[in-house]
Image: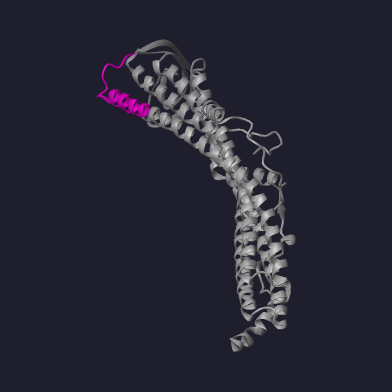
Amino acid sequence: MSTLFALLLPLVSLSAVPAEQGAPVTFAQEARADSLPVVTLREALRRATNLDPNYVAALGRIDNAGWARTAAITAFVVPSVTLSASGQRFTSEFFNIGTAQLTSQLFQGSASASLNLFRGDKFFELDRTEAELEASRASELQALYETAVQTESDYYTVLAGKELQNVARERVRRATEQLAVARARVVSGAAVQTDSLQLVLELTRARVELLLQEAELRVARFQLARRVGAAGPVDAAALDTAAAPALPLSEAAAIAEALAEGPEYKVVLADEEAAYAAMWGARSQYLPTIDLFGSYSAFDDRFFPTATSRGALGLSLSWPLWNGGQREIQMTRTRVEHDVAQARRADTELAIRRDVAQAYAAYNTARASAMLAAEAVIVARASLRVQESRYRSGATTILDLLTAQVDLTDAEAGLVQSRYATRLALAGLEALLGRRLFADQIEP
């Protein structure tokens, strides 16, 4: 045992050096946090919204649905208008109806307009486009909050990573200090050599944990940079660490609000309404179509034709009685699509009830866990102080001291994880409701 201790003594001496001098080169030394650009949560949410492809696509769907809605409205009062002009030259002369003479060229101009007076599916098309516009708006709100949840998750991962890195550094510092005390006690004969060996092992584990935390933090900063559109790693500005407040509404009220105003439910409800209108639009094809039309044509042997002109005004009625079963096929397809949309809406309603209950419980659980974790940190720190004093006086063993140190590290890490789990659970609940729950929160 004496030989083994003699071999490990240089390592023990090196371990007694402060962590900044004896520790290996780490990511934090390669790129200090104070040299990185810092982004606030408000700025991260703003930048991520403009970069998220899903949100950009949702905005595009609103534009498309808006134009479809406008077209459906104008179809009632604005006629379809067509202007055309043509010119032809022939190899031999012919009778030109415009000039009433033989000529080898013909120019013709025309204008036509048509206004639909009655078409059954036009009314249902109006309902369908209105429902699709409402679905697009709800999808935009849903995409907005989904982007916010993802951004907040990446943001909190960086903040948690920095705090866990500090926890790991404190573990290294405590192990280094305890190793110095153990070496002194071994030299004085007050402790056995294995005390130093146990603390060398603890210091090694602490340094490995610090390296792992720094690597995870580096990756988290790159992920946040991707979210906000930065080329290099980005650091997150610190948030307040005050205890999370209680939710301002009950679970039943949250479920009712999610089913009344939640973007996810609004999307499926609007999709069902659009499918219903499309189904009745297909059925309306059994009704006749009435159009009012007018035209004006001019003929000549030069451009612009003015020699002869003719106008026409008329009314047309079309009533397709059988078109090879295509109408019936479309009716069947739209009915099936409506049944699917109806089933999706019912399933989504049940899923939202579950998701809101889950998010509500997750927030309360994480909030309570954070409170208990804060108390656990206080207890663990007091226990470590007692064990350190008892070890210096020889009243306890090195194993009790190491156990107290590990308990403190676990308690500090648990507090960090519980605190940010509370924030993330709140973001998930707000995404289901489609609004912020607290007035001082940052809007996405």
Q: Dividing the image into 4 quarters, which one contains the N terminus?
A: bottom right
Q: Main secondary structure of the magenta part?
A: helix
Q: Residue at point 64% right, 31% down?
A: 248
Front position in the image: 298 or 78: 78
Query: Going 67% across and 50% down the picture, which residue do you hit?
Result: 375
Measuring from the top left, give residue 82's x and y in whole percent: 48, 23
Tell whether 33 sits left or right of 226. Answer: right
Residue 28 belongs to magenta span: no
Tell me, yes or no, if residue 171 can be seen here: yes
Expressed as whole percent of the image width and height from the top left, the position of residue 347 reads 41, 32
Q: Residue furthest front?
A: 395
Q: Is residue 155 above or below residue 115?
A: below
Is 323 included in the stretch rendered in magenta? yes
Residue at horizontal 44 percent and vertical 31 percent from the top = 350
Location of residue 173 by image quarter: bottom right
Q: Is residue 228 visible?
A: no
> Along the line of sight, which residue is nearer the eye, 46 or 128?
46
Classify 330 as above or below 371. Answer: above
| Residue 52 occupies quadrant | top right
Residue at horizontal 60%, vertical 66%? 209
Q: Quadrant location of the C terminus? A: top right
Quadrant in which residue 177 is drawn: bottom right
Given residues 306 and 66, the one toward you in this image is 66
Image position, residue 318 (x, y; %):
34, 14
Per the rendered image, the range of residues in magenta is 318-339
In this figure, which colouring scheme has been used for the structure? one colour
